[in-house]
Amino acid sequence: MEKRRLGKTGNMSSILTLGGAAIGTVTQAEADAAITMAMEHGINHIDVAPTYGDAELRIGPWMLRYRNDFFLGCKTTERDKAGAWESIKRSLDRLQVSYFDLFQFHGVDDLDTLETILNPGGALEAVLEAKQQGLIKYVGITGHRPNVYVKALKRFDFDTVLFPLCRVHAAHFNKDNDFRSLLDLAKRNDVGLIAIKAISKRVWPSKDRPYKTWYEPFDNQADVNLSLGYTLSQGVTTCAMPSDVKLWPLVIEAAERFTLMTAEEQNAAVEEVTHYQPISSPREALGR
């Protein structure tokens, strides 16, 4: 599987990231099978969070044997210094590791939250102290509003940004999902970009949901190839795999087939999905 440089971190990440959200609600045996599959296909980057059920506990036993084989990214939804320190310590313990390659402020979707994190007494103070102590190597930010991260990068020199980038968004750009300014700024600042929702299609149209994703995904190989191919052609480093392991073989095959799409191919891929409406966040999806 192709590997790309994750911005100023210098890490060569696989173009797919093992998404911890997919293994937070499965058994250890199911998690083991999924992690084995990922490793067998050359995936060397993990994204996990304490909000992903038991994902940290499922990944922990693997870190005891394979810590050096993975670039490990974790997150916190805590916004103040004390809460962030507790989150860091708890995740280190649950994952059975002594440090994180990347630690991210999770779900920062508005400027008020950003200010709380960055201001005195905010979570950034804990993360920077942990970095000084060797517990964290790089610092990132995540969420569903690219315009927020443009402002965040002007306030602090984040190493990475994790955000949604999909062809349905490109078919319906709005103030919340337009990722183009973020791509430009990240390129200038050498910021590593981690994309999510690459194969998202729309809000679930009914309660019949065959996957554990909060959005309805594209789930045939041709559509997954186009969706992942579009996202990987925008200059991102890696795409987090969807939150249902049943979809992983599809995205792995798409990643292994991937070749950079031409501008014409990208435009055609976007044109195909103009009849779908974009999704901003899990909260929005659940509210419809």
Image (cartoon, grey):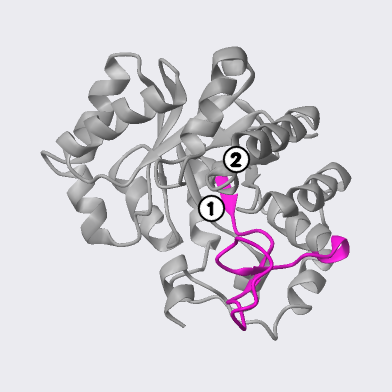
Say which amino acid is labelled 1: Asp
- Please say whether residue 27 is one of the residues in the magenta stretch: no
Q: Nearer the viewer, residue 48 or 154?
A: 48
**Residue identified by numbered label 1:** 184
Left or right relative to 64: residue 147? left
**Residue identified by numbered label 2:** 27
Mark 2 crowd level (few <14, some 14–19, many ≥20, 10 Å Cα): few
Residue 130, quarter of the rendered image: top left
Left or right relative to 48: residue 2? right
SS class of the residue under badge 2?
Answer: loop
Residue 38, quarter of the rendered image: top right
Which percent across, then down, holds residue 185? 48, 50
If you read the primary sequence from the N terminus, does the residue marked by circle 2 or circle 1 appear first? 2
Q: Is residue 237 visible?
A: no
Q: Nearer the viewer, residue 86 or 127?
A: 86
Q: Are marks 2 and 1 in contact (CB under 8 Å)?
A: no
Which percent across, then down, holds residue 274? 70, 82
Q: Is residue 65 above or below residue 61?
A: above
Q: Nearer the viewer, residue 38 or 28?
A: 28
Residue at 61% over, 13% down:
65
Q: Main secondary structure of the magenta part?
A: loop
Q: Nearer the viewer, residue 77 or 229?
A: 77
Left or right relative to 62: residue 275? right
SS class of the residue under badge 1?
Answer: helix
Which percent across, then down, holds residue 215? 59, 69
Left or right relative to 7: residue 2? right
